[in-house]
Image: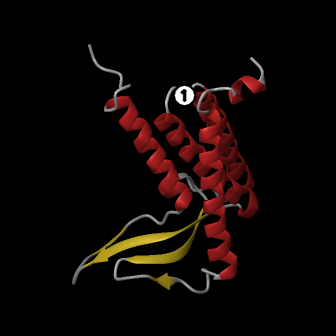
Amino acid sequence: MNFRSYLRGPYTWFGLAVAAVVCLLDQASKIYLLFVHDLAANPVRLGPFFDFVLARNTGISYGLFQTEGLLGQAVLLGFKVVAVAVLWVWLSRAGGRLAALSLGLIIGGAVGNGIDRVAYGWVADFVFFHVSGPNWRFNWYVFNLADVAIVAGVAGLLYESLVADRAVKAP
């Protein structure tokens, strides 16, 4: 099978367009917050439970598997490249618009975070939710638009496989 066959699926170009839009929006938000606004020096308080802060994530989702060295970053980037390739093959075989949309969201988010890893050696996270009371505080993980896209894409795939008309039904 040649490379062109991975571009011929009925929804492949739609999914790739979604991936491109997600990646561009993710990178534009990061460029603005890192270099125009200088989020590192100027965190933004948007309300009693929502802020923009800079978190340098050298790991993967939710800060797992933190790696400071070049080898660890290369391994994480390599894993991401393999994941995107597998998702692209899946996209080329997608049988519906929801699957293509979901896979495009995941691919775009993965590429957006991969660009960060190559450019900075870490992923720029900035959305921070927190809730506090008189004697307690709950801090949610800091995340970015690419992470939102990945989670939405996974939710779409779960919906399609468990609930939608095309869902695999148990016997």
Q: Residue at x 59, y 40 (%)?
A: 15
- Note whether 23 is above or below 157 in the view shown: below
Viewport quadrant of the C terminus: top left
In the rendered structure, which amino acid carries the disc numbered 1?
Ala
Q: In the shown orientation, is residue 89 left or right of residue 94?
A: right
**Which image quarter: residue 3?**
top right
Question: Can residue 69 be seen from the camera position used here?
Answer: no
Q: Is 171 or 81 nearer to us in this picture? A: 171
Model colouring: secondary structure
Q: Residue at x 68, y 47 (%)?
A: 77
**Which image quarter: residue 159?**
top left
CA neighbours of label 1 inside 10 A, class few (<14), some (14 to 19), many (20+): some
Q: In the shown orientation, is residue 168 left or right of residue 36?
A: left
Q: Residue furthest bottom?
A: 42
Q: In the shown orientation, is residue 95 left or right of residue 31?
A: left
**Which image quarter: residue 11?**
top right
Judged from the image, the secondary structure of the residue bearing numbered disc 1 is loop
Viewport quadrant of the N terminus: top right
Q: Position of residue 168 (x, y in %)?
A: 35, 22
Q: In the shown orientation, is residue 147 left or right of residue 37?
A: left
- Note whether 45 is above or below 72 in the view shown: below
Disc 1 designates what residue?
A: 94
Q: Residue at x 53, y 61 (%)?
A: 145
Q: Position of residue 12 (x, y in %)?
A: 63, 33
Question: What count of labels does the image hold?
Answer: 1
- Note whether 138 is above or below 16 in the view shown: below
Question: Can residue 18 be seen from the camera position used here?
Answer: yes
Q: Position of residue 16 (x, y in %)?
A: 64, 41
Q: Residue furthest left?
A: 134
Q: Is 16 or 69 nearer to us in this picture? A: 16
Q: Is 111 or 67 nearer to us in this picture? A: 111
